[in-house]
Amino acid sequence: MTTIEDTNELVGRGNREGAALFRDWFSELEQTAAAGGQAAYVFVMGSANEILKTFDLPVVFPEITSLQTAVRGVAHEYLDEAEDYGYSPDICGYVKADVAVQLRGGDHPMGQLPTPSISVLTNACNTYIKWAEIWERMYGTPMFTIDVPGTRQAGGQTWSGNSDFEADRRYVETQLGELITLCEQVTGTKFDIDKFREVLGYANTMSRCWNRVLELNAARPSLFNAVTDGTVYLGVANTFRGTEEGARYFERLVEELEHKAANGIGQDMDEQYRLIFVGVPCYPIFRRFNELFSEWGGTFVNSTYLWFASGGTNRGFQYDLDNPLASLAEGMLVSVRDAMDSMFHQDVIVGEMAKEFDIDGVIYHPIKSCRTVSTGLADSRRQMTEDLGIPSLFIESDMMDRRVVSEAQMKNRIDAFFEGLASRRRQAAAGTAESHE
Ligand code: SF4
C-alpha cells in the first residue's frame, strides 16, 4: 500500500537527483581540470563510455556543455567569440560555443573544463569529425572515429543472425579493440576485463530502465514532460552511463514513475493535448518554449530527441557479460543505428510512437544550426501527414542562437495550432452528439 509520505518522497525525485548528479559530473570535471588530469571528449551518439569508464577517464560531452551555455542565457557571448575568431554563423552552434570555451582556456559558466587527452566519436553526425579535428589542431589530441554502418534503407535495420549484421558487428568489434589499445597507450593503464564487465552491467541496468521510463509515459495522464523533465533524465543517461550512480539513478526513476502510474499521478498541469516533439529543443528559451504549449494544456509525451540523443539506448539493448567485447560491438551497432534512424527517418519513428502514446499532434522543430537533424524534416512531416494524418506544427528556430529565436512569432503559430486542435475536438464532439440523436 502506498502512502502520502511515499508520494511526497517519490514525486519529483528524478528531477532533484538528476540535477544533483549533473552538478557532481561538473565537479569531477572541475577537479580534473584543476589537477591537470586526463579526460576524454565524446559525443552523445556512440560515446563508448563503457570503454572509457573502464579506464576511469572523466568524460566531457561538449554537446551538453555547449547547450548549458544556452540554458544559462549566455550562449550568444560564446557564439560571438567563435564567430569573431572566424567560424561561420551557420555552422553547428554547439561547436562554436565549445570553441569559445577552449579559447577561454576551458572557462565554462558551470566550471572549468579539462582539456581533452583523447576524443572518441562516431559517424552518426559528420560535424563530430570536423569538431574533433579542432581539438586535434588545438591540443594535438588523438581522435578515434568509430565507423558504425547505418541501416541500408528506412526501417531496414538488420539483427543478430543476419549475415550483413554479423559482418557489420565484426567490423565495429575490430574498431573497439583498436580503441582499447589507444586508451591503454593514452592512460598507461592495462585494460581490465573484469572491470569492463562490471561497467557493462551498470550500462545494462540503465538501458533497461531508460526503455521502461519512456514506455511508462504512455500513461494517461502522462508522468513527465519529454522535453523538460526528459532532458534532465537524458543528461544523466549520457554522463553517468556505465557507472553505479547512473544505474541506481535510473532504477529509482523507474520506481518513481511506476508509483505515479499506479496512482494516476500525472504532471502538475491539466493535460489536454498529448504531443510528440521532433528535433532538438529550443535551449535559448527552454522553459518559455515549453510554457507556450503547457498554457494550452499541451504536453510532450515523447520525443525523437530522447531517442537519438541517448545514442539509441532507448532500445534497452542488454550486453552479454560472458562475451563482453563482441556484445558491446553488437549493442553499439544496434543503438547508434537506431539513433541515426531516429534523426533521418522521423516519419517511421513518429509512426511507432503514435501507436503507443495516443497523441493529438506532432511538433517539428527544425533548427538553423543542426543540419543533421533538420535536413529533410519538411518532407518527413509531409510523409507523416499522408501516412497518419496527425495534426502537426512546423516551427523553425535554433538550439543555441537567440538571434533566430522569435518568441512572438512562435507564440502566434503555436496559438493558431492549438485553436485548430480545439476546433477539431469541438467538431468531433458535435459529430458524436449528432450520431447519438
Ligand atoms: S547532431 Fe546537430 S547539434 Fe549535434 S553535433 Fe551534429 S550538427 Fe551539431
Image (tube, helix red, strand yellow):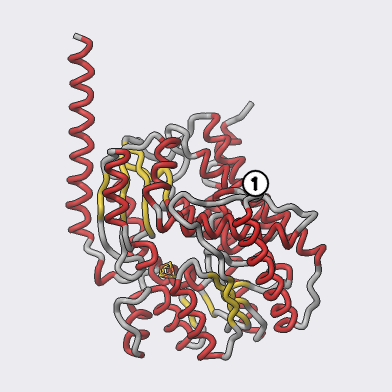
**Residue sitting at x 48%, y 39%:** 217
Residue 60 shows up from this direction = no
Looking at this rendering, what residue extends furthest in the top direction?
437
Q: Can you give x and y, in whole percent of width and height, for residue 83 in the image?
A: 33, 85
Q: Nearer the viewer, residue 70 or 320?
A: 320
Q: Can you give x and y, in whole percent of width and height, for residue 276 in the image?
A: 37, 45
Q: Is residue 149 above or below residue 137?
A: above
| Disc 1, SS | helix
The residue that mark 1 highlights is 251
Number of on-image labels: 1
Q: Can you give x and y, in whole percent of width and height, for residue 103 in the image?
A: 45, 88
Residue 236 lies left or right of residue 87; in this view the side is right
**Residue sitting at x 67%, y 83%:** 37
Residue 39 shows up from this direction = yes
Picture quarter with the C terminus? top left
Residue 430 lies left or right of residue 400; in this view the side is left
Picture quarter with the N terminus? top right
**Residue sitting at x 52%, y 85%:** 135
- Rate crowding at label 1 as few (under 14), some (14 to 19) or many (20 or more) other CA atoms within 10 Å: some
**Residue sitting at x 19%, y 51%:** 413
Q: Is residue 217 above or below residue 96?
A: above
Q: Can you give x and y, in whole percent of width and height, for residue 272 in the image?
A: 32, 35
Q: Nearer the viewer, residue 168 or 232?
A: 168
Quarter for ligand 1? bottom left
Q: Amino acid at mark 1?
A: Glu
Q: Nearer the viewer, residue 327 or 158?
A: 158
Residue 111 lies left or right of residue 297; in this view the side is right
